[in-house]
Amino acid sequence: MNISLRHIRALHAIRANGSFARAAQELGVVPSALTETIRHFEAEAGASLFDRSQRPPVPTPLALAFLQETAPLLEGPDLALDRLRARRDQTAGRLSIGCTPSAISDPVAPVLARLRQEHPDLRLRVHDDIAERLAQGVVEGALDLAVAGRALHSDDLKQTEIRRDPFGLACAVTHPLAQRESPGLQDIDPAEVISLDPGTGTQALLAGCPAVPAALRVGAIEAHSTIAQIAMIRAGMGVALLPRNALMLFADPTLRFVPLRDLDLWRVLYLLIPARRRLSNPARAFVDLLRPTA
């Protein structure tokens, strides 16, 4: 039998609305098209489904029995669609997320792109800063969550490790060390080092690493942000000790990340979420997408 869900919906719409005209309006079709659908249905069934001697036409006993049997068929798709719309509405809204600059290109931006693709009505606010200020924003509710280095312990904050990123030398491709095979820390000229503000997580890790000579921890040039630091490296002003992902901020072929044979230092990224506050639906959706990439 060549009967589809369209035919069944048409029959139920006519019964619910009491007329072909109102049913056609609900289904978004012209009355003549609906009449033709029912005629096709009757031809397939081999019986009349409406008593057309009455105005409006009344379903026959055969049609009433069919309506009763097929009601569950329509409830399933309708309920599924309702749940789909409810999920859409739950994730519509606003998400405020914080991240350190080196985490923007990976993993934050790709996850946000997927989130926006799945929930185009979602409004996003992305704030980049150092870990401690991001953690404060999460605790105080200014941010829904953050992806950053480890912050100071707080009972109001839950920190979960999601990724490790190795440190190395960031330099221009034209720099002599970019051409060296397995250079070491002793090959770096301290006069060329561009360091970060002492309050940043990156600089704190370098300061606490015994392998890094004191002369390489604080450079002749100090930058307030990773972006400024990399921009100066690109301009040929010097080099820096940075996590590998930091260079992905620019994805610039004129920059080079050089592993150092005697530097075993990693920047660990954490997911920072409130410990005493439930995540919003958009924040939960972000976390669900983030975890498979970690």
Image (cartoon, helix red, strand yellow):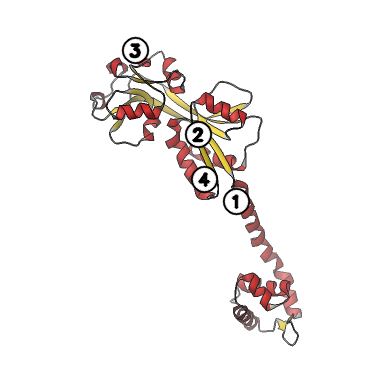
Whichever of labels 3 and 4 marks the residue nearer the N terminus, that label is 4
- Using the rendered view, name the quadrant where residue 266 is placed: top left
x, y percent for residue 110: 45, 41
Q: Which residue is mark 2?
A: 127
Badge nearest the viewer, 3 or 2: 2
86 left or right, relative to 96: right
Which residue sits at x=49%, y=41%? 111
Q: In the rendered view, tell whether residue 160 sits above or below residue 63.
A: above
Q: Which residue is mark 4?
A: 115
Badge nearest the viewer, 4 or 2: 2
Residue type for callout 2: His
Task: State the separation of the CA atoms marked 2 and 1.
Answer: 25 Å
Crowd around label 4: few <14 · some 14–19 · many ≥20 (10 Å) = many
Task: State the separation of the CA atoms marked 1 and 3.
Answer: 54 Å
Residue type for callout 4: Leu
Quarter of the N terminus within the rendering: bottom right
Crowd around label 3: few <14 · some 14–19 · many ≥20 (10 Å) = few
